[in-house]
Image (cartoon, grey):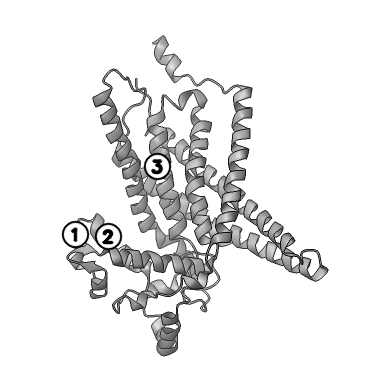
Amino acid sequence: GHSEASIRTRKPINANMVRILCVATSIQSCILLLSFIECHALLPPPTQLRRTSLTSLHNSQFDSLDAFADEASEAILGGQDLGILPRGGDAFVKSKMISPQHIANSIKIGVSQRVAADPNFLSKSILEVILAATTQYMAELSQRGWDRIIPEIDFVFAGILTAVIGKYFSMWRVAKTIDTSENNEAADKEGGDNQKNSNWRENVPTNAFQRTLLDGHTRPTLSSRFLAFLVPIPQLFRAGVMASTVGYGLTSALISLRTMFLPSYVAQTSPVSVPLAALYTGVFMAFVSNIRYQLLQGLVEPFIDLLFDKLARMGEIDGIAGSIARWRIWKSIKASIIVGVRWWNGLLGSWIAIAGMRALKLQKLAS
């Protein structure tokens, strides 16, 4: 009884360890910031990425990547034959399997649409993956305590893997999008308003706060902005289920291997119910991650961009920021703020996710 109580008791982190952690975090933040700025400087212009339109993929009847993704994911997760997809999906389906070429093409289109709406999307993507792992680890440390990281490493590893997959998909799914390809412009001229309204999904923006729809011209209505919160829910839920299944499923497999090769090792954690963890992660992504990334990419970051664009213009008028060196300083400051905002967004999401898992008794120590 005494040994069990000592295992469950969480020891406070001493002051020296806190100082070391703060210094290490500051250094890591600087490294991430420099990497982010350097990556942004090396990115090609967005116009080089906008060469393919979804309408050019074998005359597919799917007018958006998300429309096809919803149909395909429902069929796959439902264990149904991919032949049930509409005729427009024939370009994406070959021999009852999705062609790798079409997957690559669809990803390329999705990237181009997001870069068109936010030229910094690729650098933010790299940043998000790094921050997803780092902030999840920091949240694990905050929730469990330094002395419990190794004994509860099973939970920590699964949480980090799930966070990386789930957070990036959330960012991708609710990012702002604009289709500026030549094929889309030609289709707009030929089809007019009827073609724009042929698919109701085209009237729902991927982010509730973006200024225009995918065509880059039409302003979303209030109802379509509200639907922008609801439409991603099924896809985010399925992605959360799969992310958690991969994270906790792989961890369970590693635990089995550890038990096989190290039978004398006694784990201090109880096995996690993968289905329950997957269900929890799906609901978490569908609502908590959905709202967080909608606000981050639709309101917070555009406000930062607008603020620094105005400051840069004021500086040019006053002769303060006319030089290239000072312009780079403005960019560096803006990039550092974006890094900080995404850092705290990731840390908040991880902290809430871990607290929820523990509150629902999905993560328990061995008795």
Seen as rendered, the residue at the extreme right is: 318
Identity, as a three-letter code, of the amino acid under mark 1:
Gln
Whether residue 221 can be seen here: no
Residue 347 is situated, as x and y percent measured from the top left of the image, at 53, 42
Say whether residue 336 is left or right of residue 124. right
Whether residue 160 can be seen here: yes
Identity, as a three-letter code, of the amino acid under mark 2:
Glu
Disc 1 vs disc 2: Cβ atoms closer than 8 Å?
A: yes
Residue drawn at (40%, 29%) of the image: 153
Is 6 rendered above or below residue 124? above
Which label was assigned to residue 74?
2
Provide the residue designation for mark 3.
161
Q: CA distance from mark 3 to mark 2?
A: 24 Å
Q: Earlier in the sequence, mark 1 or mark 2?
A: 2
User: Closer to the observer: label 3 or label 2?
Assistant: 3
Residue 311 is situated, as x and y percent measured from the top left of the image, at 74, 64
Residues 52 and 289: in front is: 52
Q: Earlier in the sequence, mark 3 or mark 2?
A: 2
Which label was assigned to residue 44?
none
